[in-house]
Amino acid sequence: MTRRRCRVFLAGEGPSDIGDLAHEPQYRGDGEGFIQPLLRKLVDDVEIEFDGAKIAFLPGKRAAGVIGHGEKARRALALAAASEATAVVFIKDVDRTAGVKQTERDARRRIDEMRKQIETGFAAAREKSPELSNVVAVAATPCRMIEAWALADPEALRTVGANPAEAPEHPELLHGDERNPQSNHPKRVLERAFGRAANREDFAAIATEADVTTLKRRCPLSFAPLAAEVRGAAQRCRTE
């Protein structure tokens, strides 16, 4: 049986999440970040071709009524359509500072606020260009940052040579001073797991080994909703 093909445009923050797509086209290699292997796991019956851009590089003018990262999401959807993508995934960490302890309620509020910004941007793009309704648009909002997802599966960490004992039960709620190597800031925890700073290759390797069910269980606030949204979007692509 022939696998369905799908072109996905990724708008992310850097190499950790979207790999070499974060670089200008003339400087790109084929190295992946955390998101590409993860998406393949979520839609394993679809052959995915990836394109994308770093959020900071997205071109365009501001649109009235669109604030924050909604503006970048609007541009990402338009650029995805221009590159003939079937879908766009916009990846934005919810709280990169992670210096202040937050409750689950606080985390949900921050996630909701970020998602509303992104979805407003998607809606603004479609209002201006109705043909963009044919492009599936998905918001990925790691809480607090992509490192939390990378810390979610102890066995994946073990497989790639990192210390699984550093994996917390609730990685989405990690907090600490990023400047302190011994803090519970997600970057510092992942750094201790590897015994060094994690690089793009590490993120891609973890995602390749990660178990989706484990990620959904240990990151219920931000990964579980993404998994459901991606699988729903894939079903839509299959029936069109």
Image (spheres, rainbow, N blue to C red):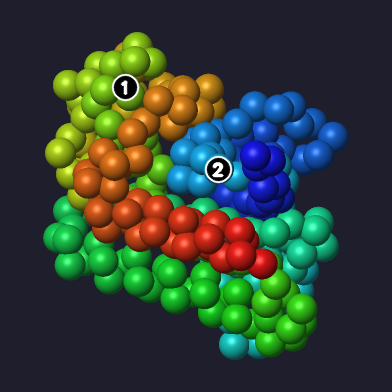
Where is residue 40? Give x, y as percent. 53, 39
Q: How many numbered marks, from 0 up? A: 2
What SS does tag 2 mark? Answer: loop
Above-or-below relation of 137 to 53: below
- Of badges 2 and 1, nearer the viewer stands 2
Instruction: Tell me if I can see residue 170 in this picture.
Output: yes
- Dot 2 or dot 1, earlier in sequence: 2
Which label was assigned to residue 237?
Answer: none
Which label was assigned to residue 45?
Answer: 2
Q: In which quarter of the view is residue 236 placed?
A: bottom right
What SS does tag 1 mark? Answer: helix
Quadrant including the N terminus: top right
Where is residue 10? Give x, y as percent. 63, 50
Residue for badge 1:
157
- Identify the residue shown where x is 52% and y is 35%: 37
- Identify the residue shown where x is 29% and y is 42%: 213
Q: In which quarter of the view is residue 183 placed?
A: top left
Where is residue 134? Give x, y as percent. 70, 72
Quadrant including the C terminus: bottom right
Above-or-below relation of 8 to 21: below
Above-or-below relation of 161 to 5: above
- Identify the residue shown where x is 71% and y is 28%: 30
Above-or-below relation of 54 to 105: above
Where is residue 135? Give x, y as percent. 68, 67
Cα distance, mark 2 to mark 1? Answer: 26 Å
Query: How many C-alpha atoms fall within 10 Å of the one at disc 2: few (<14), some, or many (≥20)?
Result: some
In the shown orientation, is residue 124 left or right of residue 208? right
In the shown orientation, is residue 93 left or right of residue 143? right
Q: In which quarter of the view is residue 113 placed?
A: bottom left
Most foreground residue, 137 or 150: 137
